């Protein structure tokens, strides 16, 4: 329950700051005049998303037919969910601070912080992935990984390496050429979304071939 209280506390703090800063959020953000709906969306969308992440994953945990496996990676699961909620809330507070204070007193370099945070989260997630066990809440969930724990383990080990490299490249590229960072983010996201299922399929096929008895003269 301590993890639940921590997440609820983060989300409550995010909503508190949203309410506090909503009346002070400038209607004019750069050259863009924000209507009231835009100010509401900017103030409350991310806290609502953080709350949704927490509630959805808690519901998945309770209903998962593979729930027994959670005890094998419970600490990793809790830390991963803490990290996801903390990233959403941290990004939200950073955006509010950017519009209210930081862009005036600190400068444009503060724009580098969100992508660096995402890079750090990717590195942490890459180290966490090999510790996950088959479940329906997080990880690379395909027919092949959920159907064979060996395939699950090998897929998540390879996926973990990819996420670590992706995170390191993202952090480095933030300082190399920040204006093109969206190309790095987009390319990495596409590779993960498309590549992970294909990777699990390839590993499953290889495992199937290696486990199939070879026909030889003695089998005839």
Image: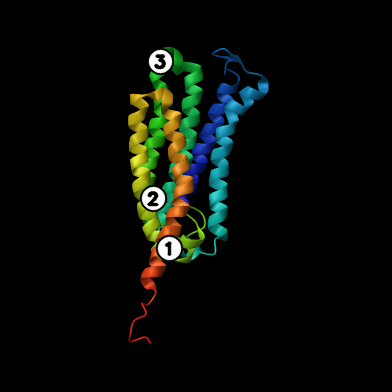
Q: Secondary structure at mark 3?
A: loop
Q: Nearer the viewer, mark 1 or mark 3?
A: 1
* Residue identifier under label 1: 204
Write the residue at 62% across / 18% down: 34
Q: Nearer the viewer, mark 1 or mark 2?
A: 1
From mark 3 to mark 2, how far is it between C-alphas? Answer: 36 Å
Asked if 200 appears above or below 212 in the picture, the reply is above
- Side of 174 where 143 appears, left or right: right
Q: Can residue 197 be spotted in the picture?
A: yes
Mark 1, Cα crowd under 10 Å, few <14 / some 14-19 / many 20+, is many
Asked if 156 appears above or below 217 in the picture, the reply is above
* Residue identifier under label 2: 159
From mark 1 to mark 3, how far is it between C-alphas? Answer: 50 Å
Q: x%, y% of residue 150?
A: 39, 64
Q: In the image shown, does 54 or 19 lie closer to the viewer?
A: 54
* Residue identifier under label 3: 107
Answer with mark 1 or mark 3, whichever residue precedes in sequence. Answer: 3
Q: Nearer the viewer, mark 3 or mark 2?
A: 2
Q: Secondary structure at mark 2?
A: helix
Q: Tell me whether the residue at label 3 lies in contact with that at label 2, contact meaning CB atoms closer than 8 angstroms.
A: no
From mark 1 to mark 2, how far is it between C-alphas? Answer: 15 Å
- Side of 105 where 50 appears, left or right: right
């Amino acid at each position: 329950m301590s993890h639940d209280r921590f997440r609820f506390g983060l989300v409550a703090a995010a909503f508190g700051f949203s309410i506090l800063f909503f009346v002070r959020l400038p209607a004019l953000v750069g050259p863009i005049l924000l209507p009231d709906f835009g100010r509401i969306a900017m103030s409350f969308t991310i806290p609502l998303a953080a709350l949704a992440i927490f509630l959805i994953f808690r519901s998945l945990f309770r209903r998962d037919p593979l729930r027994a496996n959670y005890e094998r990676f419970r600490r990793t699961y809790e830390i991963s969910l803490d990290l996801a909620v903390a990233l959403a809330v941290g990004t939200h507070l950073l955006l509010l601070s950017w519009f209210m204070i930081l862009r005036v007193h600190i400068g444009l370099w503060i724009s580098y912080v969100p992508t660096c945070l995402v890079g750090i989260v990717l590195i942490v997630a890459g180290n966490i992935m090999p510790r996950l066990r088959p479940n329906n809440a997080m990880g690379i969930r395909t027919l092949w990984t959920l159907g064979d724990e060996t395939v699950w383990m090998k897929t998540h080990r390879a996926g973990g390496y990819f996420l670590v490299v992706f995170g390191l490249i993202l952090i480095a590229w933030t300082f190399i050429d920040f204006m093109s960072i969206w190309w790095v983010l987009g390319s990495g996201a596409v590779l993960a979304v498309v590549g992970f299922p294909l990777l699990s399929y390839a590993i499953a096929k290889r495992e199937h071939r290696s486990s199939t008895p070879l026909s030889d003269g003695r089998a005839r």
